[in-house]
Image (spheres, rainbow, N blue to C red):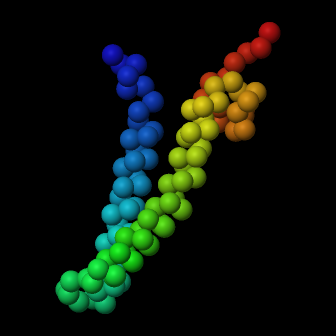
């Protein structure tokens, strides 16, 4: 049963970090478009804040997701482009 949760701490922490960046940047962009007032945003301003948040999230999230996918799909250390330091499992060839 514990095998199901092995390796879950890293993605869980990364997900928490990226979600906090996403919500924090969205609130910052909404405040930027509100100009310090409490007025409601127009649809265009709300969409612009969401698009800017998506851009910020993709800049932070995509490189880590790419690295994670590379590590998960290349089990043989000789094939892994991140070898030998970041290979998920090293094999010894005889």
Question: Between residues 50 and 90, which one lies in front from this camera angle?
Answer: 50
| Left or right of 77, for residue 37 | left
From what the image shows, is residue 10 above or below residue 92? below
| Quarter of the figure with the C terminus | top right
Write the residue at 50% across / 54% down: 61
The residue most toward the right is 94
Relative image position of residue 80 (x, y in whole percent): 70, 33
| Left or right of 90, for residue 93 | right
Relative image position of residue 20 (x, y in whole percent): 35, 58
Question: Between residues 34 and 44, which one lies in front from this camera angle?
Answer: 44
| Left or right of 78, for residue 38 | left
Figure disc tally:
0
Within the image, what quadrant is residue 46 found in?
A: bottom left
| Quarter of the figure with the N terminus | top left
Write the residue at 46% across / 61% down: 57
- Observer able to see residue 28: no
From what the image shows, is residue 76 above or below residue 37? above
Write the residue at 40% across / 19% down: 3
Relative image position of residue 28 (x, y in whole percent): 35, 75
């Amino acid at each position: 049963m514990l095998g199901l949760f092995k390796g879950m701490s890293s993605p869980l922490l990364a997900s928490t970090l990226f979600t906090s960046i996403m919500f924090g940047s969205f609130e910052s962009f909404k405040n930027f478009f509100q100009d310090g007032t409490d007025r409601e945003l127009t649809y265009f301003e709300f969409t612009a804040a969401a698009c800017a948040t998506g851009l910020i999230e993709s800049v932070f999230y995509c490189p880590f997701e790419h690295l994670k996918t590379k590590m998960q799909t290349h089990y043989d250390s000789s094939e892994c482009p991140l070898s030998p330091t970041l290979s998920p499992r090293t094999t010894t060839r005889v």
